[in-house]
Amino acid sequence: MKNTHSIALKAALIVATTQVQAQGFLEDSSGSVLIRNYYFDRDFRDGSGQSQAQEWAQGFILKLNSGYTEGQVGFGLDLTSRAGFKLDSSADRRGTGLLPYGSSSHEPESEFAEAGLTAKMKLSRTELRVGEVAPFLPVILPVTSRLFPPSFRGVDLTSKDVEDLTLHAGKIDRINLRDSTNWEPMRVSSQFGRFNSSAQSTNFDYAGGDWKIGADTTASYYYAQLENIYEQHYVGLVKSFSLGPGTLKADLRFHGSQANGDALAGPVDNRTYQYNLSYSLDGHTASFGQMRLTGDTALPYLAGTDVNVITEGSLVSEFSNPHERVWQARYLYNFAAAGIPGLTFLYRYIDGSHVDLGSSDGKGNEIERSSELAYVVQSGLLKNVGFRFRQGHYTSNYFRNVDETRVNIDYTLALF
């Protein structure tokens, strides 16, 4: 597949070079740089091993996107470049996911950089991308809560030719993790030894789509396969209702997963059922949701990505263990309703129980409480600068108790 990518990229480069003056290629191009300053502190309150993961880093993400050459089929090129710099860290405080570190010395790198090129082709409302791709789908969710998100090498196809229907398909052979500059084979996430973490695959396929049914309903179906490790079906439904003076939103999700091929990571047998109900009124949004995992194993997903569950945004735990039963409550307030646009506050409580520990130790329990305050400057010299503060407290009867603090400052500068 590496040769296929190389040939496609070279072909697109030739086409784009010969048509660089074509209308649209330059006129519709854009450039921006995301400037992100990130502080991460995970303090382990008990247990053996590293007592703290604490790092501070500065990152830059440069994006240069061309338009498309004119004609029935348009061609273009995108370039993404990332550079990260250590502001504070050490070998005994590594591992936050912000900075890469040496395999033997464990010393965090002072700086690191990488770049990725994407060739793209467009026909009507269908786009094909080859090279570095960034799918963001229920079966492959890049982690966006660190200095950089992970990136993927492969082919990604998106089509909107059918009204109210968006289709996606793709094939990936490598992942570049959020704190790495290397393209690596893919693995299944194996926290707490849930699967064999050494099992690798160089083929992840996905396909599916989202169907917008009227103005307030979206139905989704996706299939994903990490070759010789797992395969997964996902079904989702999101619907909003007017209820009294406010709006009720229902979010339903189902994952069905099993082993694929040689099952290199061990048995996979999981069904995950989820729902989340939220009610919004005058800046207030209150939510309640539940999740239940059945089958013999945890919910599988790609290592280095986020798991698609209703507890998204949790700071410490994934809440996706075998037989786990989860409920959560959230409260969000948007201060725009009080005349302070750009300011939001979020509080989250998540409770997980009945975790199968795979031993005679009984059932595992975990609780996470977290809060978040975010503000985007609305005017003046610092307009569009975003500040975000997150703090969480995690307790468990089978894992170490954790206090966690995250602070990030983001600013996206449009270059042209």
Image (cartoon, grey):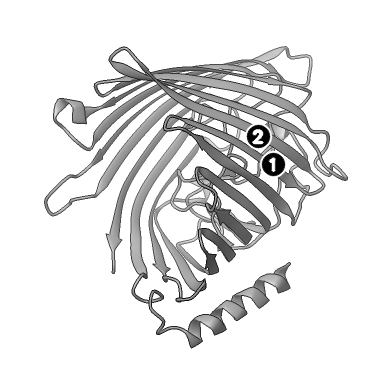
In the displayed structure, would residue 242 be above or below residue 403?
Answer: above
Disc with the residue nearer the chain's start (2 vs 1) = 1
- Residue 350: x and y in percent read 49, 19
Please report the residue visible at 35 percent of the width from the left and 67 percent of the height from the top.
30
Is there any visible trace of residue 177 in the rendered image?
yes
For mark 2, what is the residue?
Answer: 234
Q: Is residue 285 left or right of residue 218?
A: left
Q: Marks 2 and 1, Cα distance to the nearest angstrom?
A: 6 Å
Proximity of marks 2 and 1: CB atoms separated by less than 8 Å: yes
Task: Tell me how many marks there are.
Answer: 2
- Disc 1 residue crowd, few under 14, some 14–19, many 20+, Cα 10 Å: many
- Extreme residue in the bottom direction: 18
Quarter location, residue 11:
bottom right
For mark 1, what is the residue?
Answer: 223
Is there any visible trace of residue 150 in the rendered image?
no
Q: Is residue 328 left or right of residue 194?
A: left
Q: Which of the labelled discs sits on residue 75, or is there none?
A: none
Instruction: Kindly identify the amino acid type of the residue bearing the numbered disc 2.
Output: Tyr
Please report the residue visible at 45 percent of the width from the left and 76 percent of the height from the top.
70
Instruction: Kindly identify the amino acid type of the residue bearing the numbered disc 1.
Output: Tyr
- Residue 65: x and y in percent read 42, 68
Could you say which is closer to the camera, residue 287 or residue 183? 287
Q: Quadrant of the N terminus?
A: bottom right
Could you say which is closer to the camera, residue 361 or residue 413? 413
- Residue 276: x and y in percent read 50, 21
Q: Which SS class for mark 1?
A: strand
- Extreme residue in the right direction: 262
In the displayed structure, would residue 219 be above or below residue 123?
Answer: above
Please report the residue visible at 83 percent of the width from the left and 44 percent of the height from the top.
264
- Residue 121: x and y in percent read 54, 68
Please report the residue visible at 24 percent of the width from the left and 49 percent of the height from the top.
385
Quarter location, residue 416:
bottom left
